[in-house]
Amino acid sequence: MTGLSDMEELLGRIENKAMVDYMREAIGCYHAGAYRGCIVLSYIALFDDIGEKLHELAKMNKTARTISKDVKQRQEDQQVFETYMVDQLKAAKLLTEPEASMLEQVRVCRNKAAHPSGVHASPEEARFVFFEVIDKFLSKPLLLTTQAVDALMGRLGNTNFFPSNDITETKDIVQNELAGLHAAAFPYLTEKLVGACNESSKDVARNTRRFLVGLSYLQQDDLTDHIRKRLVKEKADDTDFSNLIVRVASANPRVLDGHDKTTLLRLRSVLDSAVEDVKPSVAVTQLSHPVYLLGAMLDILGTKKVLNYFKDFAEGTALKYRYSGTLVQLLNDPVELKNLWLSSLKEDAGSSTFDTANRFASNLPDIDELLPNLIKPKDAFELVVAVCRAADWGAFLSQGLRSNRFSAVPKLRDMAIQYSEKDPKSADKMVKGAQPGKDLDEFVDDFLKNED
């Protein structure tokens, strides 16, 4: 049983220092034998404290905001509000069952003490109420939801919180951590995570950012909405958050949707910079790579929305990474991007700038297998003619492709031969336009067909 010295020590555990005076007076009542006074003062401190915590939670939680408003109205109307507040908090799962049960016990003790029922409060009852009020409530920083979040935030400095960079493993860890939280905690959690992204502790900052990415990867509607508002919208103008916004958007492109015009303009800048600033060491399989982001956006948001809102980003990515097999595989559906990509290939293939033409000739074998799904035989023939033109101008890798009869790109070669046989008149016109004096049969025999 709690003794007198223990009661004094309990005062140091009270989070809200405004409640210390109430509880100190409660101890004074206890010393004077006024056990009723001890219980009543403890009760007043308890519900004042819960009311203040509810008010703080209402700033970031819609359910808490509704309860807080109703409680305040009851107080102004001089109605009994304590039971109503406990019932509403319990229903919203902002209080646990044990906490609600303990509040009911305290309420019963208070009612017995405050009314002339003929039952006198005992020292044991007074000590019980005093201890439980502080231990279960006044010593806690906020209501249930924020207590759990604060405990989680305190662990984000642990080096091994995320043992690997794998996004699937990160998602699983985040999902496991969320198991102890009610959905009402999500706004507070998101706000605390965003606020800790630039902590001086590298472990905290790194784990916080990974947690946000994992949170986004869960693709839950309520979490998506909180991340959209508290990270993407509020931090779109802060370049310190640009890389994180790209990674979060790659994990769940819906965070880019539904923004006002100003935020949309800022997000376009963030995404455009991601194309320009990405380091060569970043693989296309990483969330921060624009190719990964574009693929996720096309898959989740759809081509129309991507091109309506983020056209420059989409086109910039398609052009910069036009020789990436991962990028090329994204082009089956978006006709606009595919046409832009193909046009750039044709320009590269026949460029009079040696570096450009050589780059095409060097990278073409990497995407040859994918070409039949994306281009027509006519396009293939145009590319072959363009390579031969660049070879005539001295591009040595283009010369290598031509001298080896395009054996390094068999899919392209076969499609080009197919076109020459299907539409010889048009093919012959292309050849004469690029290499005057050479006819189609000679062109095909010299540069496309295998030697017998």
Image: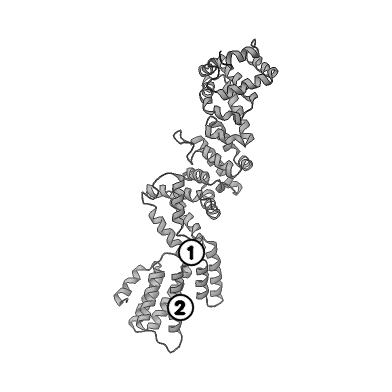
Please say if the residues under marks 1 and 2 sit with CB atoms less than 8 Å apart.
no
Residue 49 in percent (x, y) is at 44, 70
Amino acid identity at mark 1:
Glu
Disc 1, SS: helix
Q: Which residue is mark 2?
A: 107
Mark 2 is surrounded, within 10 Å at the Cα level, by few (under 14), some (14 to 19) or many (20 or more) other residues, namely some
- Comparing 127 with 72, the one in front is 127
Image position of 393 with respect to 46: above or below: above
Residue 389, quarter of the rendered image: top right
Q: Is residue 117 left or right of residue 3?
A: right
Image position of 382 with respect to 172: above or below: above
- Which circle marks residue 191 in the picture? none
Image position of 156 with respect to 250: above or below: below
Residue 216 in percent (x, y) is at 51, 49
Q: Does residue 154 appear in the picture of this structure?
A: yes
Residue 294, quarter of the rendered image: top right
**What separation in Å lies between label 1 and label 2 (alpha carbons)?**
23 Å
Mark 1 is surrounded, within 10 Å at the Cα level, by few (under 14), some (14 to 19) or many (20 or more) other residues, namely some
Q: Which residue is mark 1?
A: 56
- Comparing 67 with 49, the one in front is 67
Image position of 377 with respect to 30: above or below: above
- Quadrant of the frame with the C terminus: top right
- Quadrant of the frame with the N terminus: bottom left
Q: Residue furthest right?
A: 425
Q: Residue at x 48, y 42 (%)?
A: 243
Q: Does residue 209 appear in the picture of this structure?
A: no
